[in-house]
Image (cartoon, rainbow, N blue to C red):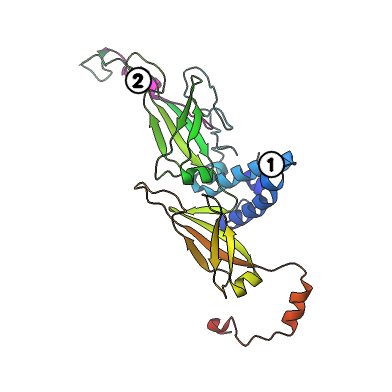
Amino acid sequence: MKDPYQALGVAKGASEKEIKSAYRKLAKELHPDKNKDNPKATERFSDVTRAYDLLLDKDKRAQFDRGEIDAEGNPTGPFGFGGGGGYQRGPAGQQHDFGNAGADFGDIFEGLFGGGGGGGSPFGGRQRSAPPPKGANVTYRLKVEFIAAATLQKQRITLEDGKTIDLSLPKGVEEGTQMRLSGKGRSGPGGDGDAIVTIHINAHPFYERDGNNITLELPISLKEAVEGAKIKVPTVDGPVMLSVPAGSDSGTTLRLKNKGFHSKSGVRGNQLVTLMITLPEKDEKLTEFVKDWDPEDNPRLNMGV
């Protein structure tokens, strides 16, 4: 993916609403469940999702627009390393990432100012010998699917030394959450450093996160809206049945308790389902019905028109 704006088909100055609308349209069209025999659609779905992730993050979008990062979120400056997802092995002495890598300047400054050994201070006077340094920390960027983050599914990562760990996501996990794995960094004379894992939660084709709640726009038929119905609704825990009251309008929001993200205390948020009436295409019976139907209510009366 060279340009996230091109991937979504939006202008560089597109609003957040326009970006979300473009993503939803493309995600529904390209979702792997609908294109099981079309690997190109699956590949494009991945590009569209990465583009949406970047452009919806205000900081990353600004960095991309300034040319500081590329379309994959990797630094473009002289100190940027790597790119793409998964574990990468960079130049010797640098830190490694799951997804994005960055330079660690700690050793450089220690060398300049004598922090790693005995002898004189650059500012005068003698300096006590520092204790043996621990090994360097190693940073990883772990991409987690939306549903997996909401339900706290364990994530397997491969460390720099090739070992794998099943990582338990913490309650309250969100975009940018950092997890420290003690002693899983590089070896040093003063002990092993740590592994620091930064969580990135992938976007979902039709779920969105609002705090610890999950929002969903649910299409329903005109008949279901008028007469009321019990319908199957997707949730991060699997489908459930939802009662739609008779006479429901588009925009009516119903709540499914404890179907959201976990808070730090362990209490789960809710899933907020917004009903969206969807009319069928070229339904002759419906067209004939409305020709003879003259409702007395004016839906725009409260707008003064």
**As drawn, 293 above or below 219:** below
Q: Residue tagged by mark 1? A: 42
**As drawn, 37 above or below 159:** below
| Residue 19 coordinates in the image, percent (x, y) | 60, 53
Element at label 1:
helix
The quadrant of the image that shows the N terminus is top right
Between marks 1 and 2 in the image, the one whose residue lies nearer the viewer: 1
Residue type beneath disc 2: Glu
- Residue at position x 75%, y 41% from top? 37
Q: Residue tagged by mark 2? A: 110
Q: Nearer the viewer, residue 247 or 231?
A: 231
| Residue 281 coordinates in the image, percent (x, y) | 75, 67
Residue 211 as seen in the image, left or right of residue 189 = right
Q: Nearer the viewer, residue 67 or 14?
A: 14
Residue type beneath disc 1: Thr
Q: Nearer the viewer, residue 19 or 40?
A: 40
Q: What stretch is highlighted in magenta?
A: 96-118
Residue 79 as seen in the image, left or right of residue 294 = left
The quadrant of the image that shows the C terminus is bottom right
Residue 110 forms part of the magenta stretch: yes
Q: Picture quarter containing residue 111?
A: top left
Q: Distance between the residues labelled 1 and 2?
A: 47 Å
**As drawn, 225 above or below 78:** below
| Residue 289 coordinates in the image, percent (x, y) | 74, 80
Toward the bottom, the furthest residue is 296
- Residue at position x 56%, y 30% from top? 86
Residue 266 visible within the image: yes
Q: Which of 101 and 28 is in front in this view?
A: 28
